[in-house]
């Protein structure tokens, strides 16, 4: 292990110890004992981020019926169900153009001018060099990981970024907290935001994506949003999430609370009772 890796591993270990020391049981008088645990988001469970319509990436841009994609080291276009079935391979920065045409996903190799795919199916686009992001126009952003490209029911492309939890956080943390803020705040935000995405993934059901890339979930701009300081906070908390009863908690947060907090059972889960609303118990790990 390199010195850099040793330092990173030590930092994550220290962060885990610190977290575990601060999630000791919370006793609610006359009710029950609550304990949060520190868990890990598995590298084998990438987050699926919807980057096409209606998601805007918090930059006011989305993907509708047409998109162009390219990567510095070239790309490989393969079947979504059989990755050994290759439809196209591009060279460095050679773009592929995707569009929704007459109920089919159509792909044009702009370098050769030939149509490489046309069918009502779903494809995966991968960088030839795993470290190279894929740039997407008209989004104006570049993304780590791979992209699943298909069709939605509204006549548009559906583009989903498959990305590891930490690479997701590298692109989401700068969208949720300014990079110049205190480093401990960035570390805490990284854990909260990673936990929220893990909760969304665990409750996705039949949905074909986990989170949107805008304020409907979390602002995520992929590789384009990354900064050295926020990436350091992600590395310092690598894979860490908060769990309750073995599952990721619904780690909600806000940009401003006005200094006032309330039991979630009186807000999100409140029930209608006649002409008014009444509180319910809420979530055991989120009480005030």
Image: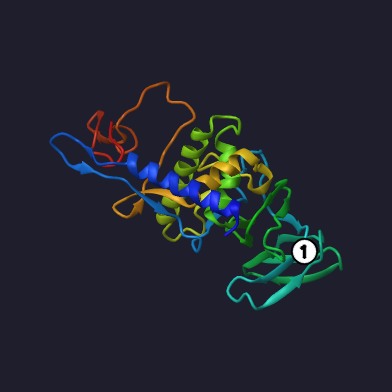
Q: Which residue lies furthest to the top in this view?
A: 258
Spot occupied by residue 167 in the image (x, y as percentages of width and height): 58, 52
Residue lying at 48% horizontally and 48% vertically, measured from the top left: 12
Spot occupied by residue 226 in the image (x, y as percentages of width and height): 65, 43
Depth check: give the residue in front, 51 or 141: 141
Residue lying at 49% horizontally and 30% vertically, measured from the top left: 255
Spot occupied by residue 69 in the image (x, y as percentages of width and height): 74, 57
> Quadrant of the rendered structure where residue 180 is?
top right
Residue located beneath label 1 in the image: 74
Residue lying at 79% horizontally and 65% vertically, measured from the top left: 108
Indicate whether 98 appears above or below 173: below
**Is the N terminus in the top left, top right, bottom left or bottom right quadrant?**
bottom right
Depth check: give the residue in front, 21 or 91: 21
Mark 1 falls on what kind of element?
loop
**Quick check: 119 left or right of 237?**
right
Q: How many marks?
A: 1
Label 1 Cα crowd, 10 Å radius (few <14 / some 14-19 / many 20+): some
**Is the C terminus in the top left, top right, bottom left or bottom right quadrant?**
top left
Q: Is residue 103 visible?
A: no
> Quadrant of the rendered structure where residue 148 is?
bottom right
**Quick check: 12 left or right of 67?**
left
Indicate whether 180 appears above or below 249: above
Depth check: give the residue in front, 148 or 103: 148
Q: Residue furthest front?
A: 3
Spot occupied by residue 235 in the image (x, y as percentages of width and height): 55, 47
Indicate whether 30 appears above or below 240: above
Residue lying at 70% horizontally and 69% vertically, measured from the top left: 77
Q: Residue furthest left?
A: 30
> Quadrant of the rendered structure where residue 5 is?
bottom right
Q: Can residue 45 be seen in this view?
A: yes
């Amino acid at each position: 292990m390199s010195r850099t890796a040793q330092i990173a591993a030590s930092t994550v270990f220290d962060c885990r110890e610190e977290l575990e020391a601060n999630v000791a049981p919370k006793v609610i008088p006359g009710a029950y004992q609550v304990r949060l645990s520190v868990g890990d988001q598995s590298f084998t469970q990438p987050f699926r981020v919807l980057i096409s319509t209606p998601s805007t990436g918090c930059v006011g841009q989305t993907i509708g019926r047409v998109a162009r994609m390219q990567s510095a080291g070239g790309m490989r276009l393969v079947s979504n169900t059989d990755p050994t079935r290759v439809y196209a391979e591009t060279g460095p920065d050679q773009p592929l153009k995707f569009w929704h045409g007459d109920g089919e996903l159509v792909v044009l190799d702009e370098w050769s001018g030939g149509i490489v795919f046309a069918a009502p199916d779903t494809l995966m686009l991968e960088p030839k060099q795993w470290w190279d992001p894929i740039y997407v126009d008209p989004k104006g952003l570049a993304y780590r990981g791979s992209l699943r490209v298909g069709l939605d029911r509204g006549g548009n492309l559906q583009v989903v970024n498959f990305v590891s939890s930490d690479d997701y956080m590298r692109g989401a943390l700068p969208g949720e907290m300014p990079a110049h803020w205190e480093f401990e705040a960035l570390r805490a935000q990284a854990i909260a935001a990673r936990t929220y995405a893990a909760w969304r993934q665990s409750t996705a059901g039949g949905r074909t994506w986990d989170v949107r890339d805008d304020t409907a979930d979390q602002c995520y701009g992929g590789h384009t949003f990354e900064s050295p300081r926020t990436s350091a906070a992600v590395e310092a908390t690598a894979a860490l999430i908060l769990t309750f009863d073995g599952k990721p908690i619904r780690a909600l947060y806000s940009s401003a609370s006005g200094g006032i907090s309330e039991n979630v059972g009186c807000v999100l889960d409140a029930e209608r009772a006649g002409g008014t609303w009444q509180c319910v118990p809420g979530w055991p790990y989120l009480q005030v």
